[in-house]
Amino acid sequence: MAQRFMLNETSYHGHGAVQEIVTEIKSRGFKKALIVTDADLVKFNVVKKVTDILDAGGFAYEVFDKVKANPAVSTVKAGVEAFKKAGADYMIAVGGGSPQDTAKGIGIIINNPEFADVVSLEGVAPTKNKSVPVIAVATTAGTAAETTINYVITDEEKRRKFVCVDPHDIPVVAIVDPDMMSSMPKGLTAATGMDALTHAIEGYTTLAAWELADTLNLKAIELISRSLRKAVENDPDGREGMALGQYMTGMAFSNVGLGVVHGMAHPLSAFYDTPHGVANAVLLPYVMEFNAEYTGEKFREIARMMGVKGVDQMSQAEYRKAAVDAVRRLSKDVGIPQTLKEIGVKKEDLDALSDAAMADVCTGGNPRPCTKELVLEVYKKAFGE
């Protein structure tokens, strides 16, 4: 069986990597950018770090800053019109998952206008043309949207998030510069960091996992577990470790998929506008417990990468518990809520949330087969009563 592995054409890493935007614009002959971002990143001068570089080089651009968390169909449509009006020929997506996902949707629709309704892109849509070129500048260390072939859009009318999986959407260039992440507040750093850990653990245990992806995901678990606490305190070494760790698991999970943590987290964002990283972080240890008996020896390696000592002397039950405990300890240390009740989930919605989770494309990759009844039980346990 052939295994496919897709990555950016080019990626730049480390402090000062954002300066390489100039190299790419010149070498690719780009003329005018639409910068896709959100108003807060403009307000707090994060986008200015990019526009200053463009201004110094005399490169033309316009800014589309209408993106919000959990971007909606209407946002993508507005971005398509902004791209056309600007006369742009490429995009620079500046932000975390929301601007990156929005840019992917815009870029696909510009070159595949038959999908202009956006919702028709759900799942593995049969697009024929590559996206408009995107230079993806990450400002959070979590989603790894700058290197994945996935993006998530919210259908506001139906109160649901849908996942699009399309090899044509991957940004041509990824800029992973920890300096672009230094303005993240503690809460966002913690949530996006736990999102990255979720990607790594789910990608390592998903049904489609294989050795190349496993290598990346295990190293990502190690980097994230030793870097996140420091990153939350804005330590430069912690920021750099998180930037690399989240990108490494992005390379992997983009190619092998995820599991029911994401399947259950997406409806929380659709129902309550819960930040995606927070939803994943709360659910992760509960789903790990649910999956434990279906993961072979993998939880031993997760525990090892998270710094647990003596795993080779532990029984299977002991190292599985140790892995879950290590995740919970990290989550608590960085201030993540521990139950769904704490983040505003309503008990009367759990049944509908379970229906939505079963319909999510990520759920099919879970190592333990899922039914609505089983997912509902996990939701109930995570609810905290």
Image (tube, rainbow, N blue to C red):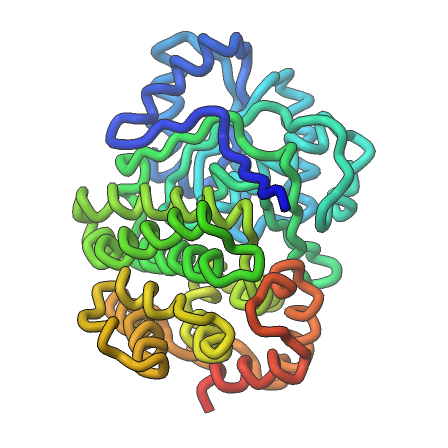
Quarter residue 177 falls in? top left
Left or right: 70, with 183 as reference point: right
Q: Position of residue 315 (x, y in %)?
A: 31, 81
What's the residue at 34%, 64% (across, down)? 302
Q: Out of 106 and 309, give the one closest to the viewer.
A: 309
Answer left or right for 211 relative to 313.
right
- Residue at 55 percent across and 63 percent down: it is 259
Residue 215 sits above or below residue 161 on the image = above
| Along the viewing direction, whichever of 291 and 51 lies nearer the viewer | 291
Q: Is residue 92 left or right of residue 235?
A: right
Q: How many marks?
A: 0
Q: Tell me if residue 341 comes above or below residue 45 in the rendering.
A: below
326 relative to 45, above or below:
below
Q: Could you tell whether 312 is left or right of 133 in the image?
A: left
Q: Position of residue 333 (x, y in %)?
A: 24, 69
Residue 374 lies, in percent from the top left, at 61, 82
Q: Nearer the viewer, residue 137 or 27?
A: 27
| Residue drawn at (22%, 69%) of the image | 308
Q: Position of residue 91 (x, y in %)?
A: 55, 25
Is the residue 169 above or below the residue 286 in the image?
above
- Specify whether residue 228 is in view: yes
Do we see residue 272 in this rendering? no
